[in-house]
Amino acid sequence: MASHLFCGRVNLNILREAARKDLREFLDKCSGSKAIVWDEYLTGPFGLISQYSLLKEHEVEKMFTLKGGRIPSAAVKNIVFFVRPRLELMDIIAENVASEEKLHPREFHILFVPRRSLLCEQRLKEKGVLNSFTNIDEYILDLIPYDGDLLSMESESSFRECYLENDQTSLYHAAKGLMTLQALYGTIPQIFGKGECARHVANMMLRMKREFAGSHTQILPVFDTLLLLDRNVDLLTPLATQLTYEGLIDEIYGITNGYVKLPPEKFAQKKQGEGGKDLPTEPKKLQLNSAEELYAEIRDKNFNAVGAALSKKAKIISAAFEERHNAKTVGEIKQFVSQLPHMQAARGSLANHTSIAELIKDITTSEDFFDSLTVEQEFMTGVDTDKVSTYIEDCIAQKDPLIKILRLVCMQSVCNNGLKQKVLDYYKREILQTYGYKHILTLKNLEKVGLLKPQSTVRNNYPTIRKTLKLWMEDTNEQNPNDISYVYSGYAPLSVRLTQVLARPGWRSIEEVLKILPGPHFEERQQVPTGLHKKRQPGENRTTLVFFLGGVTYAEIAALRFLSHMEDSGTEYIIATTKLINGTSWVKSLMDNPEENFP
């Protein structure tokens, strides 16, 4: 079921199995039949750890979503609540427990994910239901394996908490997650970092290491280096439109816990003679990970290279099916039949991805998409970043979605190291008058995190950073790329460039740029137990874990995979993050009433 977790340089299934073991142990504490009441946000992450079959083996008979009022009736001995430590959820649990106790006594249990909270327990006590719980426990789910080279904490508001609310809880969870990784995969000898949050996480890790000295198992280190990167070191990349296949799926439809929901009409299979049959109305839900051969092949390509890859695949599949005419002997027929399930799966996969590519192409070939992309690329190359953009003015006048406007205005501000006061005031006035004064708090939030700010007296450093790190590459080859800039058709993500330079020739070569970028940069070494030093074979690659604090985009992941596969790179990358993001979900997390933002 989790075959895609084995395929990378590091076997991430070890982490998944450890999480499954903890889950089984907790379920076995509650002996007898059970109903699980889920905090809806947790169902996706848990789906990546265990299937319903595992829960069923441990006497889970029913599952419900946490809602106010009464729990739906279920003839079970135990009711188990799986929840995040949120006060508002405690009120709903208290209501559930109170109404249930009046009807029939049961055993109640609560499992906090990822940590227990005294505040939440206090709230349950105030509501008079704390003593109704037989077990109150925590399930430490910090880093969830998403793919063979990808881990995420799926902490939905980590960037907002760290940079807006000054709440470092998610950084503590990141440090704990890294300690769990080291317990399973060995001590990481070298730590590099850039940014305030990176410094905090490194400090917490080193402190935890000292506190647990001697208690760690003796494991040969799998990772050579850990790189901790703050999202606010590179605010530009998430604002840009991702141009890889996977990035565009996420930009347009949103990928949640490895699944995407798509409009059903492209996936309806028309049979002969059923021309006017009703089309399905339910969205088509597809799982996206590298277990699917074709998806693994095309996910990180620039979208302009996907069509050619799909048509090449179609020819290969059709040739494979034609082989049946050449099968003459019983042995040959038998061999063809044994390959048939794999070939049919490949044909189904091709049909799905052709449909998705058609859906995306309808959008990427539109005039609106092209105009927006042109403006983004002008900002990134420093064209007219210091004056009001007529394109943004027109978008506001046409009342385009607010999130699109905010992404563009923030991008202009970041590429210009802040906007002139009168330009900033003009944008703010236009946005508030068009979309409503309720968004004044959102604008304040964007200013506070540094996405939208007035120009200070300090000169604009972005052109220096762009030139030194070669962030803009003319004539990027999208079909057969030779540089990471293909993921944004010209723009090389700053975060990934920093990672690339660290591997070779090292950060000392860009000391001046590192000083310009926000937050400290540092290097730490961790003592590896005697006898566990890795002896590298000639030609063997180093393994680096890159941890993005505050979120990472699929285009950045694609760029890191590209570096891993480069012949002379010498380094393979595993990616970890607090959250998988795109520009829309990221800006939305900083809004104060996001559900009202889409006119």
Image (cartoon, helix red, strand yellow):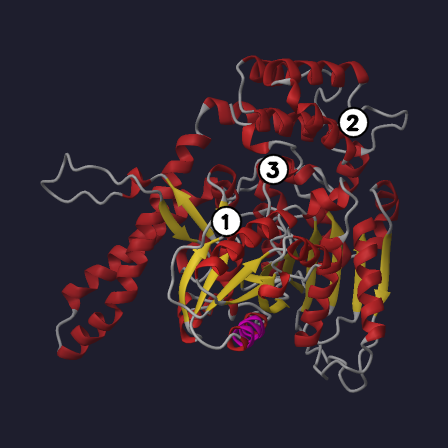
Mark 3 and mark 2 in contact? Answer it, CB < 8 Å.
no
Q: Quadrant of residue 454?
A: top right
Task: Find disc 3 in the rendering and name its residue.
Answer: 583
Q: Is residue 184 visible?
A: yes
Task: Tell me what residue is drawn at x 58 percent, y 60 percent.
Answer: 565
Q: Residue furthest bottom?
A: 531
Tell me the SS state at disc 1: strand
Q: Does 19 appear in magenta?
A: yes
Foreground label between 3 and 1: 1
* Left or right: residue 539 compared with residue 21: right
Residue type at numbered disc 1: Thr
Q: Quadrant of residue 134?
A: bottom right
| Chain-order first, disc 3 or disc 2 | 2
* Left or right: residue 181 compared with residue 461: left
The answer for how far apart the CA atoms under marks 3 and 1 are is 15 Å
Task: Find disc 1 in the rendering and name its residue.
Answer: 256
